[in-house]
Each structure stands twice: as structure tokens, then as C-alpha cells.
Image (tube, rainbow, N blue to C red):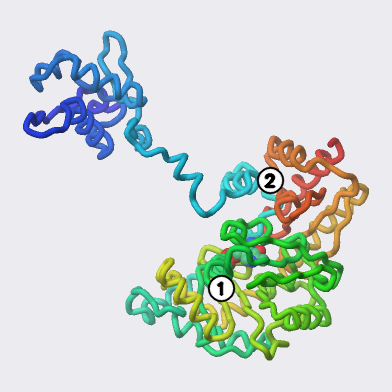
């Protein structure tokens, strides 16, 4: 312990009797300020009550009251015969009884809290002692570091400032994307593109800009959006559409359209099932939406991650009516930390979303937008994708072998043709909460199927993209044992 931490603090303060603030509060305010600023640190002592009363020329009872408050907040401890020692310097401890009732405020916000299981997953994904069997991210060793260095090297000569950017996003990036998306058959002008901070933000913008409370959001059952509160928090109702091997089957549901209903789909290597929508189904879904005058959100987050052959062209390429809002993102193919996604749609809609985006955050990171521009223009993005796909394919095959060896008796699954996930359907009805808890005790984290579904189920999503292969194998073998025991 340093000399300073053992010593008694310097109390350079005098009370002001000309103001209306009670003396106890003045003394408390000074002590808290010194601790928050870090001038006084844990381990140091406050003067004894008698000494401080003398120093400040106040009644001893005033100091007793101030110290008692500090003790009750857990900031100091009064050690018998050793004076009062500072034991905590966290800000939250400084909140006295005068603070607002935060709980009441917290519960009244528009946005609902995440499902507890999702909160747990979000937290534990950052615990290095845990094996992540479901994480939908690229393993750190697959990240193209050298290419990223080259890209970042180029930015200073292009981005003369990192000021705010126009409402639709960096023009250079929109031009680069407009050209790049032609690979997928998409013919969109820069003015029909909005750059967003990840496609998640696109969903948020859509729900607050063009939908209204009571709107119905139709989506595959199960779906990634069922694990999001975005639509529900904004008053929309979710309705699930069953899927077969070719994708969603909207004609099965009966849609008594309420105003502003919308369809959401992940046609390419769907999250969480990895089902890849056939070309014919894409047309059928589009036709259904057109005949119901229902806009379609096509979330194509996994398009680039095909492992055997590219998916069919985006639904948007089949649309001549302006019915489709197409979402893309760099998150799955390159880096979610860039927070770069895009929306392609009719100019009026894209401008509306851009206007709300400006009101929300004034634009996606300009550094990331320049980086993404450079990734695309330099050709490094495509080069990286070629390498990444090969490695991802090896990972998929590795995990499929493990499943073949250890899961044949307990589960069914489809072979994913792309994306990150294997959707495991347990043959026996299983309490997935229990499996989740027991797996965590064994330091294994996976995403139970119920977080993607409006119905309960005995499924789980595995990912072959993230964990190291030896850990993934060990973890999967252990998980199979846990499932068998439940
Ligand atoms: N759409 C789908 C289908 C996803 O799986 C994800 C991420 N899991 C997202 C969108 C969100 O991606 P972003 O990082 O671009 O917000």
C-alpha cells in the first residue's frame, strides 16, 4: 500500500453559512466530490469526527450525521479505534436517498427489456472461459488482419475530415455499393441506398418510420426477428409463417391485413434454420406480397456466405413494383464491429428512413463508411470472401462430422449450404431451459431455439463459425451428454 493510501486525507474546505444548503450536505458534497475525482482513494482515512468538527467549527453531531450517511452508502467504514476509512469509490455508491426512483423510470421506457435468456447470452459471449457453440460471428483467427491494415492505410489520403455525413450516408460508399451489388443482379442507384449502423438499425428505423402500432409483421417461424424486441416494443404484432425446405409459405396463413402490415424474410441461409429459399419460392413470396399489397423486407445478411453454390438472386431483382426493401450488412461477411449495413429501396422510403436516422444518430461512423468503401473499391472485399468461404466450408464439414458421430440418435438437422448455423431439432421433447443451465455450469453457451420462436420447441442453433474447432468438438460432445441426461 502506498504512503498516500495509508494517510489521512487533506481536508481543504470550509462550510458556507450564507447559503441555504444544510451543513451536513455541504460536507457530504465535498467528500463525495473528492472521492469521485480520485483525489482521495480507497484505503485513506477521514479525519476523526472530533477533529473535523473542530476544523470546520461545526457541531460534532453534524459530522456524525455526514459520516453515518457515508457508512450507509458503503463509501466509508468506521473502524473502531482506527478512524473512518474510504472503502469504495464507485459512482453508484454516491447516489444518496435523494436520487430519482430509477426502477420506475427504467420500467416505463418504450423499449421492452430483452428476454432474460438473451440477456444472459449477450453477457456471457464476452466471457473467455466459456465455449461459444452458437455465436453468429467470424472466429477471430479468420479475420483478415493484413487486408484490414491495407484498407486502413488508405483512409487518411481520402477522408480529409471525419465530419458528419449527408443523410443517406457517404456518397463514395453508396456509389461503390451500387456498383458492387450488380454482382447479385441488383440495379440500385446511390440515391436508392441508405447507409445504416448495421441492418439492425434498418429494422429499428423501419419500425418507427413507416409502420405504426398495431401493424402486423409477418416473418418466418422461427426467425431472427423473434429474438428482437424492436417490432414488439414499437407496438407491432409478430405473426409466424411456417417453412418447408424451400423457405416460407405465406399462402398457408390467413392474413386479414391490418393497415401497414409488412413481411420480413431472410431468404438466403436463414437465421436460425439455414434454409435457403429456392428461386421459385422467392417468386411466390414476392407475388403473394404484391397481391396483398404488402411491402417486403428482404434481409440478406448471409448472402455472401454460400459454401456450395451461390443462392438464387435476391427477391428484389424480381421486383418491378418497388415492393421490396433490401437489407445488406458487412457484419457477417466481414466485421460486425464496423456497424455498416445498407437499405436499398424506393427513393421516397430511403429518404424517409434517412431523415429519421439523422434525428436518431446523425449517421453511421464516417470512419467505418470510408473503410467499407475502400474494402469494396480495392477488390479486397471479394478477395477476402473467397478465402473466408473456403475456411467456413471446412468448419461446416468438421462440425457435421462431429454431429454424425455424436448426435445421430438424439437429433435431426439439415446440411447448411451457407451461412453460419446448424439448426438442431432434438428428437425427444426436452426442457431446453434445463439444458441451457446445465451447459452453462459446464462452461458451454448455446442459443436455445425458443429465443427465435413464438412457440416453445426443443431445438437449438449451433454455429460452426466462431469457436476453435477442438473446443467446438469437445463442447458438442459434452452437450450431447447433457441433452441425453435431461
Ligand atoms: N439480420 C440477420 C438475419 C442477422 O442474423 C443479424 C445478426 N445476427 C442481423 C440482421 C444484424 O446484423 P447487423 O450487425 O448488421 O445489425
Q: Residue at x 56, y 48 (%)?
A: 113
Q: Give the farthest residue toward the right.
A: 409
Q: Is mark 2 within 8 Å of ligand 1?
A: no
Note whether 411 is above or below 327 in the view shown.
above
User: Mark 2 = which residue?
Assistant: 445
Mark 2 and mark 1: span between their CA atoms? Answer: 37 Å
Q: Which mark is residue 251?
A: none
* Quadrant of the image occupied by residue 307: bottom right
Q: Nearer the viewer, residue 302 or 61?
A: 61
Quarter of the figure with residue 140: bottom right
Viewport quadrant of the N terminus? top left
Q: Earlier in the sequence, mark 2 or mark 1?
A: 1
Position of 26 compared to 443: left or right? left
Report the residue marked by disc 1: 210
Q: Secondary structure at mark 1?
A: loop
| Any part of residue 209 in sight | yes
Q: Is residue 55 left or right of residue 256?
A: left
- Determine the image quadrant of residue 330: bottom right
Q: Secondary structure at mark 2?
A: strand
Residue drawn at x 53%, y 67% is 208
- Work out whether residue 408 or residue 208 is closer to the camera in this orientation and state it: 208
Q: Quadrant of the C terminus?
A: top right
Q: Residues within 10 Å of mark 1 (few under 14, many from 20)?
A: some
* 163 relative to 284 in the view: left or right: left
Location of residue 133 in the rendering, given as x and y in whole percent from the top left corner: 71, 51
* Residue 146 can be seen, yes or no: no
Say how many tags the image has. Answer: 2
Residue 239 placed where, x, y %?
73, 62
Where does residue 157 sit, x and y in percent of width and height? Answer: 37, 81
Left or right side of 404 for 214: left
Q: Quadrant of ligand 1?
A: bottom right
Amino acid at each position: 500500500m502506498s504512503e498516500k493510501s495509508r494517510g489521512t486525507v487533506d481536508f481543504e474546505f470550509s462550510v458556507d453559512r450564507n447559503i441555504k444548503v444544510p451543513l451536513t450536505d455541504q460536507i457530504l458534497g465535498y467528500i463525495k466530490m473528492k472521492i469521485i475525482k480520485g483525489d482521495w482513494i480507497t484505503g485513506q482515512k477521514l479525519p476523526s469526527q472530533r477533529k473535523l468538527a473542530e476544523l470546520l467549527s461545526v457541531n460534532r453531531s453534524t459530522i456524525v450525521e455526514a459520516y453515518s450517511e457515508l457508512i450507509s452508502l458503503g463509501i466509508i467504514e468506521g473502524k473502531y479505534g482506527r478512524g473512518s476509512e474510504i472503502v469504495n469509490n464507485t459512482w453508484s455508491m454516491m447516489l444518496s436517498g435523494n436520487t430519482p426512483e430509477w426502477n420506475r423510470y427504467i420500467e416505463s421506457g418504450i423499449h421492452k427489456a430483452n428476454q432474460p435468456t438473451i440477456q444472459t447470452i449477450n453477457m456471457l459471449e464476452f466471457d473467455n472461459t466459456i465455449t461459444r457453440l452458437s455465436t453468429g460471428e467470424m472466429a477471430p483467427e479468420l479475420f483478415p488482419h493484413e487486408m484490414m491494415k491495407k484498407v486502413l492505410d488508405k483512409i487518411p489520403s481520402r477522408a480529409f475530415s471525419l465530419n458528419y455525413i449527408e443523410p443517406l450516408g457517404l456518397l463514395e460508399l453508396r456509389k461503390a455499393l451500387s456498383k458492387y451489388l450488380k454482382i447479385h443482379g441488383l440495379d440500385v442507384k446511390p440515391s436508392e441506398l441508405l447507409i445504416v449502423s448495421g441492418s439492425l438499425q434498418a429494422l429499428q428505423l423501419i419500425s418507427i418510420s413507416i409502420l405504426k402500432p398495431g401493424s402486423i409483421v409477418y416473418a418466418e417461424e422461427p426467425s431472427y426477428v423473434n429474438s428482437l424486441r424492436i417490432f414488439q416494443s414499437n407496438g407491432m404484432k409478430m405473426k409466424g409463417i411456417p417453412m418447408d425446405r424451400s423457405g416460407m409459405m405465406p399462402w398457408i396463413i390467413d392474413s386479414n391485413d391490418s393497415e401497414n402490415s409488412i413481411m420480413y424474410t431472410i431468404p438466403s441461409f436463414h437465421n436460425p434454420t439455414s434454409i435457403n429459399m429456392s428461386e421459385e419460392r422467392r417468386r411466390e413470396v414476392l407475388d403473394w406480397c404484391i397481391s396483398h399489397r404488402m411491402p417486403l423486407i428482404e434481409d440478406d445478411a448471409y448472402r455472401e456466405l454460400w459454401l456450395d453454390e451461390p443462392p438464387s438472386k435476391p427477391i428484389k431483382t424480381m421486383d418491378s413494383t418497388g415492393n421490396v426493401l433490401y437489407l445488406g450488412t458487412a457484419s457477417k461477411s466481414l466485421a460486425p464491429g464496423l456497424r455498416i449495413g445498407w437499405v436499398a429501396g424506393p427513393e421516397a422510403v430511403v429518404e424517409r428512413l434517412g431523415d429519421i436516422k439523422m434525428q436518431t444518430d446523425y449517421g453511421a461512423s464516417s470512419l467505418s463508411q470510408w473503410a467499407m468503401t475502400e474494402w469494396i473499391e480495392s477488390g479486397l472485399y471479394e478477395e477476402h470472401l473467397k478465402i473466408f468461404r473456403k475456411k467456413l466450408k471446412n468448419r461446416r464439414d468438421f462440425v457435421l462430422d462431429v454431429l454424425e458421430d455424436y448426435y445421430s440418435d438424439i437429433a435431426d438437422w439439415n446440411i447448411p449450404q451457407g451461412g453460419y448455423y446448424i439448426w438442431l431439432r432434438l428428437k425427444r421433447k426436452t426442457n431446453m431451459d434445463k439444458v441451457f443451465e446445465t451447459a452453462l455450469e459446464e462452461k458451454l453457451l448455446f442459443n436455445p431455439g425458443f429465443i427465435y420462436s413464438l412457440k416453445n420447441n426443443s431445438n437449438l442453433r449451433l454455429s460452426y463459425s466462431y469457436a476453435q474447432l477442438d473446443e467446438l468438438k469437445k463442447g458438442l460432445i459434452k452437450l450431447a451428454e447433457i441433452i441425453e441426461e435431461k
